[in-house]
Amino acid sequence: MPEGHTIHRLAKDYAARFAGRPVTVTSPQGKFSDAADLLTGAVLTGTDAHGKHLFLHFRDSDWVHIHLGLFGKVTFGDAPAPPPTDTVRLRLACPTGYVDLRGPTTCALITDAEKQAIHDRLGPDPLRADADPAAAWARVRRSRTAIAALLMDQKVIAGVGNVYRAEVLFRHGIDPYRAGKDLTPAEWDAIWADLVVLMREGVRANRIDTVRPEHTPEAMGRPPRVDDHGGEVYVYRRAQQPCHVCGTEIRTAGLAARNLFWCPTCQQR
């Protein structure tokens, strides 16, 4: 599932290509046809993102709410647009280009009130200007749940996925099984500040890189990481490989239905 930086990057890309322009809206797959008929010819007036939720704004109060889920994909292209396949849930097109959405968990036309309800149920997003880290800390500090699980709970903090949670905990030497209530305010502040920096860089580079300069392939004289997710990381999907810092074998285990990765030496409880 894409992490929050990808969704914010998509919001920027949709806006850069289509904002301020009337667009042709279609649903070749048919599942969004009624809404597409209502929107076609309207101007895309803006975009928004919160956690893993993307919003496209049309007219005064029409929003297309998109959640990619596990299988959703977005493809941008230049004009002329090729004939769409019947797997395309939503296509926006204008004289200069097009964008296809396939396989999302959610693609729905919603109102301002319905959009606000989505914001209200999500935790603060490190990439949003209106984010309040104190709101997340208020939930973390009272919880007996492992911090690794809390970081993945979108009601606590929105946008953090499996990669960022594993990497930020490693970068701050925090055992992923520590209860939220056992973190100090200083540790939480450091985690939040680091997520802001790392995720902003993720938006800029369109990939996740979390290693510090002294641990890059060039600095360490090691081969670059080869992985479908790209980017240089400390622990994510590096099970049984040596830690870049101490050489200990990286461990993995299941937690909250996702694979967790950590270094038992660098992240002692």
Image: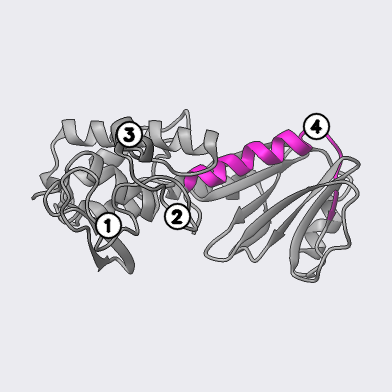
Instruction: Give the number of the disc on residue 226.
Output: 2
Q: Neighbour class for label 2 at 10 Å: few (<14), some, many (≥20)?
A: few
Residue, disc 4: 20
Instruction: State the separation of the CA atoms marked 1 and 2.
Output: 27 Å
Which residue of the protein is positioned furthest toward the left in this rendering? 269
On screen, 254 above or below 13? Answer: below
Label 4 residue SS: loop
Residue occupying the point 19% across, 57% down: 145
Label 1 residue SS: helix
Q: Does 22 appear in magenta? A: yes
Residue 166 location in percent, x, y?
A: 30, 51
Q: Does 246 appear in magenta? A: no
Q: Which of pointers 3 and 4 indicates the residue nearer the eye?
A: 3
Near-viewer residue (180 or 219): 219
Residue, disc 1: 149
Residue, disc 3: 219
* Nearest to N terminus: mark 4 or mark 1: 4
Q: Do the residues under discs 1 and 2 have CB atoms within 8 angstroms?
A: no
